[in-house]
Amino acid sequence: MPTAVVTGGAGFLGSHLTDRILSEGWRVIVLDNLITGRAENLAHHADNPDLTFIKHDVSQPFSIDEPVDFVFHFASTASPVDFIRHPIETMLVGSYGTHNALELARIKGAKMMMASTSEVYGDPMVHPQNEEYWGNVNPIGVRGVYDEAKRFSESMVMAYQRYKGVDTRIVRIFNTYGERMRLDDGRVVPNFAMQALRGEPITVYGDGSQTRSFCYVSDLVDGIWRLSQSNYQLPVNIGNPDEYPIRRFAEIIQALTHTDSGIVYTEFVTPDDPKQRRPDITKAREILGWEPKVSLEEGIRRTLEDFKQRV
């Protein structure tokens, strides 16, 4: 039975990835300090002997006393609320944490995948964003702690690939949503959904013309798994290319929750908030045979059912 280490495996995305790896017949060792992850995300595996949970900050050194075949480095804060609340921790997990994950892969002779992000493109001046675009990032802005940590991580991964011989993958993840997102996550989906479910006005920052492309979590995890099993070693965008203005997304949430909540617009806009976000997934289609299958309406319905159970 092959063994995978998943850092951040108790988080929203990490726990869904852990589910997929276990379903493929692998053993999984999860490392998570629970700064933004939740033990409840793995509770359904409580009696599964193929899952081991270790509470640990991967920014600190660690070792695994058994063979390891694959290291998935998914530990990080992932929402503006979290990386503004935990700026130093965000930079450390994207530097020391990435180094420690790569060292584990090197020592064990394992493959390694790093979870990067569409934030490496910053507030893009190329649309849609392809993997060859270098980005437009403010290194000293409030979002810089996350954006630059991920950009640094990508550089370190490529250095280990070129100079240490580690077989690596980089997945650039675009906006993702689904079950197990924290209700106080601060990102668009839980914000709008929770306001609507509580009968509160849905708050849109700015005029709502900024765009996002939302990918349902099962689709995203399928792309991640396919990339991990491929031989492709350069970054690959995984996300849904269907692009929506934020105000349109608010209207979809209104319709699906059958709420009487109105939509209110505020002049506040997060500093350096990207005006457009849409992945070019040509490589994912050609190299991995992947593209998203779950419609936005269906994915939101599933997510809302999960949220309702936890309100």
Image (cartoon, rainbow, N blue to C red):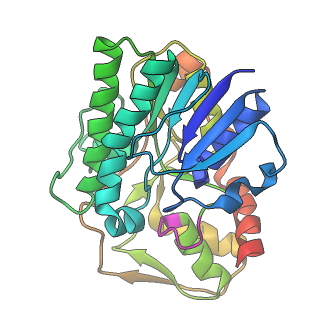
Residue extending furthest toward the right: 47
Q: Residue 111 location in percent, x, y? A: 51, 20
Q: Residue 309 location in percent, x, y? A: 77, 73
* 101 sits to left or right of 142: right
Q: Is residue 186 at all visible to an observer of this figure? A: yes
* 289 sits to left or right of 210: right
User: Depth check: 71 or 154 in front?
Assistant: 71
Q: How many marks?
A: 0
* 160 sits to left or right of 195: left
Q: Residue 25 location in percent, x, y? A: 78, 26
User: Depth check: 211 or 39 in front?
Assistant: 39
**Start-end of magenta stretch:** 182-188
Residue extending furthest toward the front: 65
Quadrant for the N terminus, please: top right
Is 67 inside the magenta-drawn segment? Answer: no
Q: Residue 82 location in percent, x, y? A: 41, 65
**Quarter assignment of residue 205:** bottom left
Residue 71 in the image: above or below residue 211 = above
Q: Is residue 168 at all visible to an observer of this figure? A: no
Q: Residue at x 35, y 69 (%)?
A: 85
**Quarter assignment of residue 87:** bottom left
Q: Residue at x 56, y 59 (%)?
A: 37
User: Depth check: 235 or 56 in front?
Assistant: 56
